[in-house]
């Protein structure tokens, strides 16, 4: 095989494209090496193992998601910003790669870059809640409740073939408003 001048970013980009084609869980060092037309053992120059490669893919894609969310929230505040955040994570087409159940992400939280991006995502909810609620306990409980609801809806909406997405989105939005009303009391 021909010599390639590769770097880690090119390897991660190739693995990301591969994940789009075959699914995140199916990505391996061998398949990525084939995509790059290099020997599988050459992959160890750039990543430690398949989990390390997947961690790098997730970190990069989570960073894209969080940056996209911040861009979408420009000019919004309070309940409107929180609703937009939750609707985007639950229903948005923000990535073809990241597992939408986020439990898949948990396997990679021992990688600093993945943990950093996950924390950036998770910290958005309490930051927005603080503009609506001053009670620290309600912010903490509300963060947990809203995060669980948002991530649960993300899984449900993607894994239910018989979705009436218009109705699901309307119900989800109404439920967010009810949760926020409960937290304010």
Image (spheres, rainbow, N blue to C red):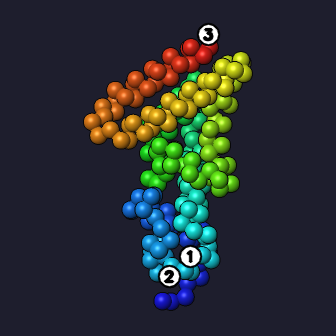
Q: Residue at x 62, y 69 (%)?
A: 48
Please give the residue where the numbered disc 1 appears in the rendered image: 43
Q: Nearer the viewer, residue 68 or 38?
A: 38
Cα separation, mark 3 vs mark 2, equals 61 Å
Image quarter of the C terminus = top right
Q: Position of residue 52 (x, y in %)?
A: 59, 63
Q: Residue at x 46, y 24 (%)?
A: 173
Secondary structure, mark 1, is helix
The mark nearer the N terminus, 2 or 1, is 2
Q: Nearer the viewer, residue 14 or 142?
A: 142
Say whether residue 58 is visible.
yes
Please give the residue where the numbered disc 2 appears in the rendered image: 38
Using the rendered view, name the quadrant where residue 183 is placed: top right
The mark nearer the N terminus, 3 or 1, is 1
Please give the residue where the numbered disc 3 appears in the rendered image: 185
Query: Does residue 3 sit above or below 155 in this rendering?
Result: below
Cα separation, mark 3 vs mark 1, equals 55 Å
Q: Residue at x 55, y 28 (%)?
A: 146
- Which circle, 3 or 1, is nearer the viewer? 1
The mark nearer the N terminus, 3 or 2, is 2
Secondary structure, mark 3, is loop
Q: Position of residue 151 (x, y in %)?
A: 50, 36
């Amino acid at each position: 095989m021909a010599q390639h001048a590769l770097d880690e970013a090119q390897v991660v980009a190739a693995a990301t494209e591969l994940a789009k084609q075959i699914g995140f869980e199916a990505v391996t060092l061998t398949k990525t090496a084939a995509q790059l037309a290099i020997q599988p053992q050459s992959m160890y120059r750039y990543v430690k193992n398949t989990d390390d490669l997947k961690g790098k893919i997730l970190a990069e894609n989570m960073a894209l998601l969080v940056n996209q969310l911040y861009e979408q929230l420009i000019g919004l505040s309070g309940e409107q910003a929180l609703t937009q955040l939750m609707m985007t994570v639950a229903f948005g087409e923000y990535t073809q790669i990241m597992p939408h159940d986020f439990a898949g992400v948990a396997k990679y939280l021992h990688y600093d870059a993945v943990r950093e991006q996950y924390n950036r995502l998770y910290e958005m909810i309490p930051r927005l809640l603080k503009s609506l609620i001053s009670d620290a306990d309600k912010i903490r409980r509300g963060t947990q409740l809203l995060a669980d609801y948002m991530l649960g809806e993300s899984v449900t909406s993607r894994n239910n073939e018989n979705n009436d997405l218009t109705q699901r989105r309307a119900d989800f939005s109404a439920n967010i408003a009810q949760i926020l009303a409960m937290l304010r009391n």
